[in-house]
Amino acid sequence: METFTVEGKIREGRGKGPARRTRMTGMVPAVLYGARKESISLAVNAKQVARILRSETGHNTIFSVQVAGGSEEKAMLKDWQVDPVSNALLHVDLLRIAMDVRMRVRVPVHTFGEPQGVKMQGGVFETVTREVEIECLPGDIPEEYRVDVSEFLIGKQLRAGDLPIDPAKVKLLTDPTRVLAHVVMLKKEDEPVVEAAVATETAPAEPEVIKKGKKETEEGEAEGAAEAAPKAAEKKGKEK
């Protein structure tokens, strides 16, 4: 397994200004804490930290922190912040590690192979959870758990309890019945043509409304003409 060392120095300044100046030198603000020791504010090599995050073990990597003028300590990356635009590291939290003390970590779960339920039955393979939580000594932390899902048929589920975990070294903290992945039947979508047909049947007939309005108008005009006829005759008699 590849070993890593992160170089650092004691950080004096606080606030955004000193932190910005630290990053300009290729370092990143950090805090080293844990193991019942006093917290130390550091500036650590940003490239070395980024290299650890890109490694196979990622944030579960145990590495050495070499502080200028101080002793070397074992640590892990507990948390980190990155710039959302440049993806550059802004700050890291380093957790001291005691190699003889059990600790809780999250380990990624990776599947491989094409399930029979997908290839032969037309199902869909879905990943539900990509990691599990375990408890073990720092030296026993696995890089990952790999599971072959080639024989999975529709309805088959991969649960946390199915992972190849050595109970003598590792304790599974995630619920053993937790579903990590499964093969399911592809759901059929409703045809929009049927909905359009229903909408057409229930929609009101617009021409009938227009025809009705026209009929009412014609009837109103006829009634008005009938009322006006006697009045016109009466007026004509007076004039004579």
Image (cartoon, rainbow, N blue to C red):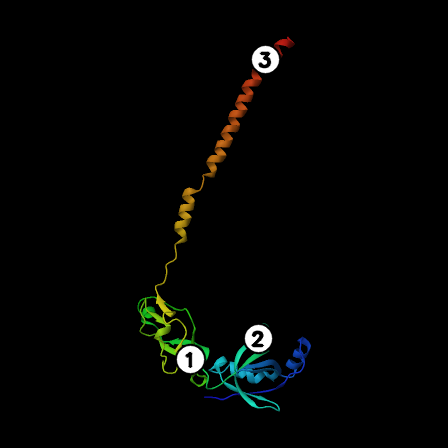
Q: How many badges with numbers are in the image?
A: 3
Taking 161 as reference, is 56 left or right?
right
Q: Is residue 157 above or below residue 139?
A: above
Q: Position of residue 26 (x, y in %)?
A: 62, 83
Q: Position of residue 71 (x, y in %)?
A: 57, 91
Mark whose residue sits in front, 3 or 2: 2
Label 3: which residue? 233
Taking 188 as reference, is 225 left or right?
right
User: In the image as oriented, which residue stretches furthest toward the top?
Assistant: 240
Amino acid type at mark 3: Ala
Q: Position of residue 169 (x, y in %)?
A: 39, 83
Mark whose residue sits in front, 3 or 1: 1
Q: Quadrant of residue 178?
A: bottom left
**Local secondary structure at mark 3:** helix
The answer for how far apart the CA atoms under marks 3 and 1 are is 107 Å
Q: Residue at x 55, y 20 (%)?
A: 225
User: In the image as oriented, which residue stretches furthest toward the right?
Assistant: 17
**Local secondary structure at mark 2:** strand
Q: Quadrant of residue 129?
A: bottom left
- Residue 144's label in the rendered image is 1
**Dot 3 and dot 2 residues touching (CB under 8 Å):** no
Tell which circle, 3 or 1, labels the residue nearer the N-terminal end: 1
| Quadrant location of the N terminus in the rendered image | bottom left
In terms of depth relative to the viewer, which is nearer, 99 or 234? 99
Amino acid type at mark 1: Glu
Label 2: which residue? 81
Tell which circle, 3 or 2, labels the residue nearer the N-terminal end: 2
Amino acid type at mark 2: Gln
Q: Position of residue 33 (x, y in %)?
A: 56, 81
